[in-house]
Amino acid sequence: MAGKELNATSAALLGLLHEGSMTGGQLMAEATRRLGPYWTMTRSQVYRELPALAEAGYVRVGKPGPRASVPYTISASGKRAFTRWLNEPTRIGLLRDTVALKTVFADAMSDGARAELYDDATEQHQEALANARELAKEYSKEDPGAAAAMEFAVGYHRSAINWLKKR
């Protein structure tokens, strides 16, 4: 990874580590809290990327603590790699939505199953929308960039709800 482009997951981890040393579990919790409404990371992705970041010299690995948790700290080269990543041209992300995928094959579903799919998805998007709105309000005071990103999540969930209403 040294001298090479970071993938988005690695870059997100480096960005989170700018706030201070964290264990993998703490990084996962912080990623869920700060990024989750618009960017998901799995635990396996986090634990796969951390050793690669350490091998590249982008993070330093601390001494194991309670329950063998290991703290990671961003290095100077990690900060430079993160800054390079931030300044690279960006393409939009690929959308992967299971409800939209199932809609392609909705003719093979019963009317009841299709209605349940859309009702469940609407409920989930409404909950996610309320969460994203709350986080956008919370971040507006302390972190304008995070608040702006949260507005993306608000718009996404609004759009999804409007699309689902037409089904």
Image (cartoon, rainbow, N blue to C red):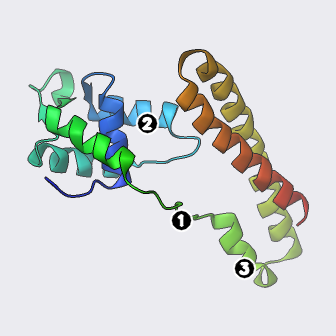
Measured in 3D between alpha carbons, the distance from the residue under mark 3 to the one under mark 1, in whole angstroms, is 17 Å
Whole-percent x and y of residue 158? 79, 47
Kind of residue at badge 3: Val
Residue lying furthest right = 166
Kind of residue at badge 2: Ala
Mark closest to the chain's N terminus, 3 or 2: 2
Mark closest to the chain's N terminus, 2 or 1: 2
The local secondary structure at tag 3 comes to: helix
The residue identified by callout 1 is 94
Rendered residue at 57%/45% (across/down): 38
Please determine whether, in this image, residue 111 is positioned above or below residue 123: below
Residue lying furthest top = 141
Of the pair 57 and 162, the residue shown nearer to us: 57
Please determine whether, in this image, residue 146 is positioned above or below residue 43: above
Whole-percent x and y of residue 63? 8, 25
> Do residues under tags 2 and 1 come within 8 Å of each other at their CB atoms?
no
The local secondary structure at tag 1 comes to: loop
Of the pair 34 and 84, the residue shown nearer to us: 84
- Can I make out residue 43 in this image? no
Q: Quadrant of residue 21?
A: top left
Kind of residue at badge 1: Leu
Whole-percent x and y of residue 107? 81, 84
Whole-percent x and y of residue 17? 30, 30
Drawn side of residue 143 relative to residue 118, left or right: left
Of labels 2 and 1, the one closer to you: 1
Residue count near mark 2 (Cα–Cα under 10 Å), binned few <14, some 14–19, many ≥20:
many
The residue identified by callout 3 is 104
The local secondary structure at tag 2 comes to: helix
The residue identified by callout 2 is 31
Rendered residue at 63%/27% (across/down): 135
